[in-house]
Image (spheres, helix red, strand yellow):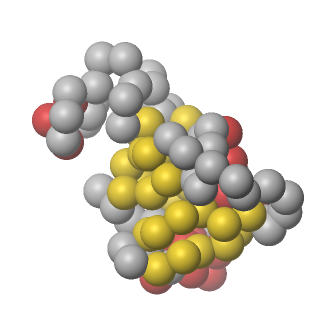
Amino acid sequence: MDAGVIRLSDLPNDRPAEVVGPDEHRRGFARRWLMDSGFTEGALIAVPEDVRGDPRAWGQVRGTLIALRRDQASQVLVWPVDAPGRAAGREGRPS
């Protein structure tokens, strides 16, 4: 995993992030479902400030409010928007 990339399940409330994509070890239907739900590279996401529990709402993903269980959220890799060393936009992300 690249430096600065974390799992969606570890993203603090009310902190925006850019989706890197499903975990590279996730295959088959589970991976396809995450991608079909909008968890694709470049999608912006934030955990609403007052959301707790399991399943948990993950804010607007491509215009849709999505709820995932913690184990599902741990399969999505994200790049926090305000991560150290990350410039605004995609050009700050390691390839």
Quarter of the rendering containing residue 10: top right
Coordinates of residue 25 in the picture (x, y in percent)? 60, 53
Coordinates of residue 20 in the picture (x, y in percent)? 40, 50
Q: Is residue 58 left or right of residue 74?
A: left
Does residue 71 show up?
A: no
Coordinates of residue 78 in the picture (x, y in percent)? 47, 45
Quarter of the rendering containing residue 53: bottom right
Coordinates of residue 31 in the picture (x, y in percent)? 56, 71
Q: Is residue 57 left or right of residue 55?
A: left
Residue at point 59%, 56% (across, down): 48
Does residue 68 show up?
A: yes
Q: Is residue 67 left or right of residue 76?
A: right
Residue at point 59%, 74% (across, down): 66
* Farthest left residue in view: 91
* Farthest front residue in view: 50
Residue at point 19%, 42% (across, down): 90
Compared to residue 26, the image places residue 79 above or below, namely above
